[in-house]
Every structure is written in structure tokens, then in C-alpha cells.
Image: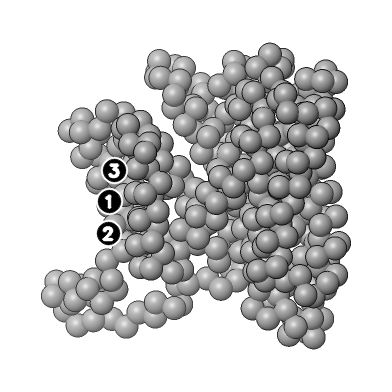
Amino acid sequence: MTKRGKALAGFALAAVLLNLVPTLVEATDSPGFYITFMFTAFFWISQAVSWNILTGYSGYFSFGQGAWFGIGVYTTGILAVKHEWPFLLALPVAGILAGVAGLVLGMVVFRLRKLGGEIFALTTLAVAFVLASVARLYSFIDGGRGIFMTSTPLPEFLGDFRTAMFRMTFVVAFLTLLAAYLIFESRIGWGLFAIRDDEQVAHGLGVPVFRYKMLALGTNAFFSGLMGGVWALQIGFVTVDDVFNIRVPLFVILMSVLGGMKHWMGPAVGAVIIYTLTDRLNSAGLEDVNQIIIGGLLIVLVLAVREGIYLRLRARWKLALATFLAALSVWTLADLGSSVIWDFAYASLLTVGVTLIPTRARRRTEVRSEGPPVAVDEEASTDRGPG
């Protein structure tokens, strides 16, 4: 089986196993919070991975995630509540409209070479502010009154609200990861990486620069809007201030940088770590210092692991896996955590901490226990493109 075949088989297996989670939670009479925790993690995974398709692959730094997310939220709100569309019919429209908005922006900024770098980033940030003003001004969108989503009917086959949210967010996150992987392993991925390294050289080598950048931006906006459409149900009461704000883009950037922007899986790992820490800190009553702790931890991790957590974990996967399983077993058997999520959080933090041990220190330990050192090319383990 080829490498791509194995990866797609892994995707299929993960889809089957994760789809069984609601049934398993119900069968074991576990708290429904576990399902809520997982579908919120799926939300952040999709947002971070879709953002990285543009920024991580092409190098065009974007603050537009809040805009695409907001378009998705308001599209499902308007269609499902004000026009009484079936929710599952309104959902793809949310993704399509966000994607079209992204392509319209791309038609302008990508045609003008001066709108690159920090100018591009500020332009995408301005889009969210413009859309927020438009939503406030026009009553057919919001008009400052908000939209109640709490009574929106869902098909019975999706199950109760938690199960329905789990299944919908899982499908969107799964499709986002699949798209990120397929682009990463394709000629388009190679072209985007060339643009990231040097756009002028990439153009000279025959890379269809404009087309590839449009594809990356459109894909980013589509999946962000699609997940935004699902998330409108979780928000319940949709308002401009709750939707078009800086929280989503900032968290997405932090998650992607922490996980690693040079690999398609990096942002997903970063999203799980950041969301788990945030959730546990909030549950411990540390909401006021949550951002301080997360920010300080990110500074340390970014300085220590510039390539991102994922590539470091993959380079030391045996050590990481052994540490995680051992820590999880100890905390679970000793009942040190109050829930499975706490056990997972403790084990994850310890695993990340162990993999942060400097390479030289780790080699000294290996030398003392095993004898002469073996040369290891640390750079060889760092992905710079597909493969």
C-alpha cells in the first residue's frame, strides 16, 4: 500500500472510531460533558487547520478567520431562523458564501503586489470590522437585535443536541483535515510552499501563483464558514460582538504556531493542547489568569520549539508515546485527576515537557546508558514540504 493509501486508511479508521464516541459515552453512562469537550475541540481543530492552509502553506499571514467564521454564523442564522430553511440545507450555503467572500478579497489583494506581507494581514483584519458594521446597519442581517438559534430544529437522525453537534463538527473537522492533507501531498502543496519561500522565484519556475493563492484562500474561508455555520447553534444567541471579534483569529494563530505551521497536522495538535489547557484552567476557577498562563506557556514553547510541537513529537514519537501512556496510566489508576479530561491534560503536559528536553542533554543521557553516541540529523526530521 502506498503512503497516501495508508494515510487515507488511517483517516477512515479514525472516522469510524470517533463516530462511536457518543454511543460509548451513553453505554457507559459517562457525563455528557465529554461529548461537549470533543465537539468544541473539533471546532478549534477545523479553524486552525483551515487557517494554516493559507498562512502555513503559502506564507500569507491572515487575520481573516473571524470574518469567514462570522459569515458562516450569520448565514445559517438568517436562512434557518428568518427564512426557515432546513438547517442542513443552510449549512453548505454558509461555507460557500464564506468561500466566495474569500475569493472576492483574493481577486483584489492578490492582483496588487503591494498588498502583501503586513498589508495583507491588516486588510484581512479590516474585513471583519467592515462586516460587523454592515451586520449592525442592516436589519435583514442583524440590525443590532441578534438572532436566536436556540429553537432551530435539527433532523432526528442526528440525535440529541450534544450528539448532533458532535457529529456535525466532527464531519467538518474531518473534511478540513482531509483537504489539508491532500493539498499538502499534492503539486499544489509544493507550489504553495514555493510561494512561501520566495514568490518571485516560484513565479519564474512556472508555478501558477495567483491560482494557487486563490485556492488556498478559498479553501480556508470555505471550511471556516462551514464550521461557523455549525457553531451558530452552540452560540445560541448570535450577536455581532460575539461573532466578529478578534478571539477566533488570535486563538487560531496561537494554536497553529504552537503545533507547527509547516505540517498539515501541526495546527490540529496545537488546537487540542491549547483548548484542553484553556478548558481545564476555566474549570479550576482560573478564568482571570487563564490568558496569562496560556500566553506565558506559549512564549516558552515557541522559543524552545520553533518548528512546532508536532514535528518534535514525531521526531521523538517512541519517547512521547511511552511518556503519555505511562503518565495516563499512573494518573488514572491512582485517581489523581477528577475526570478523564484532567488525566489527559496532565499526561499531555508531561509528554510535551519531556519532548522539550534539549537534544544535547538527551544524548548525554543516552551516552551514559548505552555507550558511544550515534549521529542524529535533527534537521532531517523537520518537514519542509510534502512527504
- The residue pinned by badge 3 equals 346
In the picture, measured across the screen, residue 183 lies left or right of residue 383, that is right
The amino acid marked with disc number 2 is: Val
Rendered-image quadrant of the C terminus = bottom right
Place of residue 203 in the rendered image (x, y in percent of width and height, measured from the top left): 79, 81
Q: Which residue is mark 2?
A: 354
Helix, strand or loop status at disc 2: helix
262 lies above or below 250: below
Q: Quadrant of the N terminus?
A: bottom right
Asked if marks 1 and 2 touch (Cβ < 8 Å), the reply is yes
User: In the image shown, does 80 or 105 lie closer to the viewer?
Assistant: 105
- Residue indicated by mark 1: 350
Q: Distance of mark 1 from mark 3, alpha carbons?
A: 6 Å
Residue at image coords 76%, 47%: 130
Image marks 2 and 3: residues in contact by CB distance under 8 Å: no
Mark 1 crowdedness (10 Å alpha carbons): few <14, some 14-19, many ≥20: some
Calculate the distance from the C-alpha at mark 2 to the C-alpha at mark 3. Answer: 12 Å
Q: Secondary structure at mark 3?
A: helix
